[in-house]
Amino acid sequence: MGWENIRERLRAADLTWSFRDHGAAAAMSVAQLPAVSVLLWINDLADDDYGSGYNPLAALVFLIIGAVLAVVVALSQPLGLSLPAVLLARFGRRRLGGRTWAWHLATPVAPAVAWGILGALAGAGPFAFTVPLLTALGVLPSLWVARVRRRTWRQWGVWGRAALISPVLVVLALGGGLTALAVGLIQQYEPPRLTTAQLAGVWKGASGAELRLRPDGHADAVRLPLTDRKSGPGFTDYTMCGGPGTWEPDGTGRDGILVRFDCGRATHWAFAGSEHAPELFARYGDEDGGTVWILQRSG
């Protein structure tokens, strides 16, 4: 059986993948990206940003990464998700009948499960999270391929119509995400409120950093980063300090503690983490970015 024979059999079974199919899947995959970004942003509200502010440079980097990601998605998503989903939908429709849209709605689960298993085996992410995510990302492109197939649109028309759908998806994502926040499905992060009893003890961080807090307000430190005396407005450097010192609750800005040692300036360490897994953090460097030092309760 020659290649031409195989191609004819696949064409007869409607199991081919054309450039037009790929273009339709790529167009809708890219059109989904802004809505996905909105959902990720809303989901990030449930995580601690450790006092980071708006950074114009970070926003520019995000846009550049988004542009690169759009190209990657346009090339990879159609082959990794849409191709197997669409071919399964066509095969199932011809063999078992039923609504075309229903098959294209259901079959993205299959490649999502396959990638979910591979991802779980490789340690890239939990199966229970990966499968629903990939299924959601595969549904609209699969449906779009089926719709475009029944139209005589040119490629620019396929991409143009997908681009018009993109802001609609953004509005739906924003509305759904804000609703989830309002009803409590997504909990906006709130730092814990720690008492003196909860703060007393040993806190450890990277590079051997250690802070021992005593209930009477005394403290001991080993390689603890504190604000450098040379720091100025807009930029805060740090210096490693050790030895005996003091601490006290500090509600200036975000709740935390103020620690004082012989070297460096008095430094605010803010509360982070949760009631069950509390953390202390201090941010150094640029006000909108810089380095975050995190101390975790030991024991």
Image (cartoon, rainbow, N blue to C red):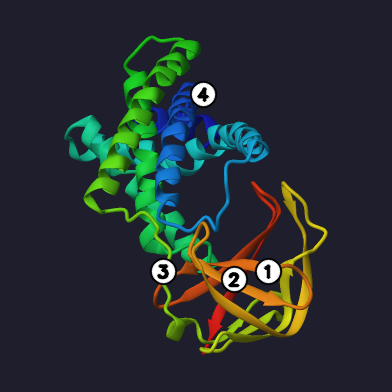
Residue 192 got which mark?
Answer: 3
Q: Residue at x 45, y 27 (%)?
A: 31
Nearer mark to the viewer, of 4 and 3 = 3
- Identified at 42% across, 56% down, the residue is 114
Mark 4 and mark 2 residues within 8 Å of each other at the beta carbon: no
Q: Are marks 2 and 1 in contact (CB under 8 Å)?
A: yes
Query: Badge 1 is on which residue?
Result: 266
Element type where label 4 sits in the image: helix
**Mark 2 surroundings: few (<14), some (14-19) or many (≥20) residues within 10 A:** some
Residue 278 drawn at (x, y percent) = 47, 75
Q: Earlier in the sequence, mark 2 or mark 3?
A: 3
In space, the residues marked 4 and 3 are separated at their CA atoms by: 54 Å
Q: Amino acid at mark 1?
A: Ala
Q: Is 287 situated above or below 262?
A: above
Instruction: Classify residue 67 by image quadrant.
Output: top right
Instruction: Pick whichever, 91 or 271, lies toward us.
Output: 271
Spatial CA distance of label 4 from label 1 is 64 Å
Which of the marked residues, 4 or 3, is nearer the chain's N terminus? 4
Q: Residue at x 24, y 35 (%)?
A: 93
Label 4: which residue?
Answer: 19
Name the side, left or right, on which 156 lies relative to 135: right
Give the residue type that dot 2 points to.
Leu
Report how far apart the C-alphas of labels 1 and 3 lie in the structure. 22 Å
Q: Nearer the viewer, mark 4 or mark 1?
A: 1
